[in-house]
Amino acid sequence: MTLQQIYYALTISQTGSLNKAAEILYVAQPSLTGAMQELEKELGITIFHRSGRGVSLTNDGLEFITYAREIYHQYETLMSKYGKAGKRKKKFGVSTQHYSFAVKSFVEMVKQFDTEEYEFAIRETKTKEVIDDVITSRSEIGILYLSDFNRQALEKLFRTNGLEFHRLITCDAYVYLWKGHPLAGKQSIRFEELEDYPCLSFEQGAEGSFYFAEEILCTKEYTRTIKANDRATMLNLMIGLNGYTLCSGIICQELNGSDFVAVPFEPCGDSAGSRMEIGYIVKKNLILSSMGQMYVRELNRYLTP
C-alpha cells in the first residue's frame, strides 16, 4: 500500500465517481481503477461498490477511509513541517456547533497569518459531524458543549474514540430572540412563558439524538418546534415567527447583528440542569499546532470577561 493509493482512494470517496476522481488526479481512469483493484487485493477487502451511478463505500471501505484520512493527514502535517517549502500550504480546520464567538475567534486568528501560505477551514455543522471531523483529523479542534443531560453519553463517545474535552467556560442558559419579540424586554423568562412561541433548533440529521442537540433542555415538551440548518435561517425565523432558542447567551453582535437579545432563562423544577459547559475537543495527547494554540488563545480572550 502506497501513499499514492491512499490519496487515490480518498479522492474517489470524496467525489463518488471514478471519472471525476481521474480528472482531478490527472490520471487515466483505467490506471486509477487498476490502482484501486491492486489496493483491494492487497488489503483483502472491497473498498468501493461500483454501479452505473458511480461508486460508494462498502462497510469495510468506510472503516478503511477513516484510517486512511488520518494517515494522509499525518503525512501532510509531516511534509508541511519537515518537507521542502515548495507551494504546499499548511492546513488548519475547526468544526463547531453554531456559535458566533467560535467564528469571531477564528477570524481573529486567521488575521495573524498569511493566507497565501495556509489553508484554513471552519465548519458550522451538526454535533455528530463536529466529533467525526476531529476523529478523522478533518479538523484539529471541535467546539461543543456538555450539560448534566448529555455529559455521560458524549464523554463515553470521547473516550471510545480517543478524544479529550477541554473546558472554556461554564454559563447559564439564555433565551435568544428578536428584540421586537413580546418577551424581549423581560428581566428573565420562565419556560411556561414560551409556550405560545415556536422553539427553534438546529437539525441534527438522520443520526441525530437528544444527546446531540445544540439546545439545552431538548427533552422538554415544546408546543411548537421548527428546525433549521444554519444560523442565518434561524435568525430569520426569530424575526418572522417570533421564534426563540435556548443558548449560552454569548453572542457576537458583529456577526449576528444588533437586532437580537439574550434574556436570562429562569429555571424551575426539572429545568434546574440548565448550565452549559462549553469547550473544545481534540485528539488525546495531541500537541496543538501553532494555529490551534493561537485559536484557543483567541477563544479564551473572547470568553474571558
Image: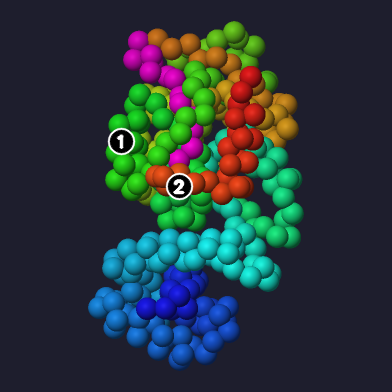
Q: In which quarter of the image is residue 219?
A: top left
- Where's residue 223, x and y in %? 42, 25
The stretch drawn in magenta includes residue 273: yes
- Where's residue 136, x and y in %? 42, 56
| Residue found 67% across the figure and 57% down from its top | 118
Q: What stretch is highlighted in magenta?
A: 269-281
Is residue 266 in sight in this rendering? yes
**Which dot marks residue 286?**
2
| Residue found 70% across the figure and 40% down from its top | 108
**Which dot marks residue 153?**
1
- Where's residue 230, x and y in %? 57, 43
Indicate the amino acid at tag 1: Ala
- Asked whether 191 or 215 is in front, the reply is 215
| Residue found 60% across the figure and 26% down from its top | 303
Label 2 to label 1: alpha-carbon separation: 22 Å
- Above or below, 264 relative to 72: above
- Above or below, 77 relative to 187: below
Number of marks present in the image shown: 2
Indicate the amino acid at tag 2: Leu
Is residue 103 in sight in this rendering? no
Q: Which of marks 2 and 1 is in front?
A: 2
- Asked whether 281 or 90 is in front, the reply is 90
| Residue found 25% across the figure and 78% down from its top | 44
- Where's residue 98, x and y in %? 55, 38
Quadrant that contains the N terminus: bottom left
**Which dot marks residue 71?**
none
- Asked whether 253 or 197 is in front, the reply is 253
Quadrant that contains the C terminus: top right
Q: Residue furthest front?
A: 82
Q: Quadrant of residue 67?
A: bottom left
Q: Is residue 149 left or right of residue 114?
A: left
Q: Do the residues labelled 2 and 1 touch (CB within 8 Å)?
A: no
